[in-house]
Amino acid sequence: MTGSIARVQGPRRILEVGPGTGPFTKAILKKLRAGDQFDLVEINRNFCTKLERDLLAPYRIRHPNVAVRLHCSPIENAELHGPYDTIVCGLPFNNFPPQLMRQIFRRMFALLKEDGELMYFEYAGVRVLKGPVLDRAGRDRLKRIDAIGKSLRRKHNGEKEFILGNFPPAIAYRLSGKARAKPARRVATATR
Ligand SMILES: C[S@@+](CC[C@H](N)C(=O)[O-])C[C@H]1O[C@@H](n2cnc3c(N)ncnc32)[C@H](O)[C@@H]1O
């Protein structure tokens, strides 16, 4: 999830969305260098307090040349100024309304450089496992989430990697900031 940070030379701009208690944050902090900027956006106040106290404040003292900012707010309307080289997103989209998932990806791509990369993940087989315990509306919602993910991966040159060593096993997705050009529509020509 954090590997693509190393791909960028020079000062980097990195955004983490939904850090929670900070498992990805810890890995990102280890990779930062002087001149980098690292923004985090987390909706939950308790997680913000914990992240700031346990990870970010001590890091800033030891690394005054790295700009680390926590925005305690939803990504949808956080005051963020792109573009970023890398976005690492830990949001659990399989629990989200499809419309919100679309809105969040639109925001993240608006903040990502064209040659930047966006990483997100889901637990392997989560939709198959959840399906039988959901009602029809819940299953329809999961189908739409699945369709949105597939369409994003088609459009943004998506790559996936199975992380079998994780418990539970997960799939990490990498999307490119540049969207593929839409294939030209064939125009039917009238023949007499
Ligand atoms: C499943 S946790 C992921 C935490 C961590 N990355 C991990 O792998 O353990 C998702 C986090 O996203 C946060 N979150 C949910 N919706 C959000 C939103 N719209 N904007 C920012 N953060 C959000 C939640 O509060 C939660 O801390």
Image: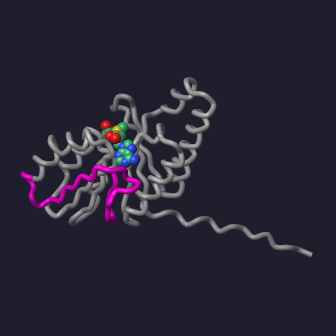
Residue 37, image x and y in percent? 22, 60
Q: Residue furthest right?
A: 192
Assess whether residue 160 is covered by the magenta stretch.
no
Which segment did they paint magenta? 61-89
Place of residue 58 in the rendered image (x, y in percent of width and height, measured from the top left): 10, 46
Q: Is residue 68 magenta?
A: yes
Q: Quadrant of the C terminus?
A: bottom right
* Relative horizontal placement of residue 190, taking residue 71 as reference (left or right): right
Q: Nearer the viewer, residue 97 or 181?
A: 97
The residue positioned 20% from the left and 61% from the top of the image is 36
Name the residue located 65 percent from the left edge and 68 percent from the top edge: 184
* Residue 35 position (above or below residue 19): below
Q: Which quadrant of the frame does ligand 1 lie within?
A: top left
Q: Is residue 181 shown above or below 73?
A: below
Q: Quadrant of residue 166?
A: top left
Task: Please give the name of the residue rendered at 55% of the width and 52% of the height, measured from the top-left corner.
Answer: 151
Residue 46 horizontal/vertical position (percent):
25, 39
- Quadrant in the picture for residue 190: bottom right
